[in-house]
Image: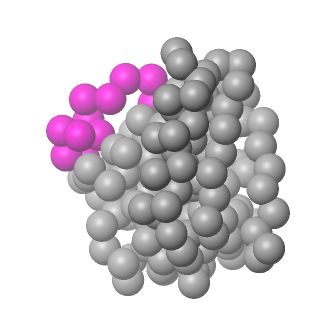
Amino acid sequence: MKAFPLFITVADRPVVVFGGGEEAAAKLRLLLKTEAKVTAVASAFEPAVSTLDGLTRVQQNPLDFTFDAQTPFAYAATGDMALDAELARHARAQGVLVCAADQPAVSDFSTPALVDRDPVVVAIGTEGTAPVLARNIKAQIEFILEP
């Protein structure tokens, strides 16, 4: 096992997503289900992000962003793999764990497939190597754990 599974308490803590498009919006929608203080950082925001409620948008060069000391993790989801890798280095240099979308080699963590049946949450992780298998397992668990 290369990765250790855990649940991080994010209530009232800042969590950052770099990106202003659909890739970032997918991460933001997931984070907005939590009690975290969610911030999106991008040079520009597409409607996928600009229409989301419940988050703070910071329009600036994401490489100039300074993290709050309480930030447990961030996502680099700009849609530009080179920029995401650079943002991963930027976050890590400030002591923040980071997941660069679709780049396990430059990421500190991956996001598992989730089944949320509050208060039960099931996480299915494949260390980023088998997303199709994770989705299939998720579908089976969703069937077992009816809403």
Q: Along the line of sight, which residue is nearer the eye, 3 or 130?
A: 130
Q: In the current view of this chain or complex, which residue is farthest to the left? A: 47
Task: Name the residue at 44% across, 57% down.
Answer: 18
Question: Horizontally, is 67 left or right of 17 in the view?
Answer: right
Q: Position of residue 131 (x, y in %)?
A: 47, 63
Asked which colour scheme the image uses, the reply is: one colour
Q: Along the line of sight, which residue is nearer the eye, 142 or 9?
A: 142
Res 59 seen here: no
Residue 83 sits above or below residue 97 on the image: below
Task: Name the residue at 70% across, 49% down.
Answer: 71
Q: Would you say residue 57 sits in the magenta stretch?
A: no
Quadrant location of residue 77? bottom left
Magenta stretch, main secondary structure, is: loop
Res 137 seen here: yes
Which quadrant does the N terminus fall into? bottom right
Question: Horizontally, is 17 left or right of 7 in the view?
Answer: left
Q: Which residues are magenta?
A: 45-55
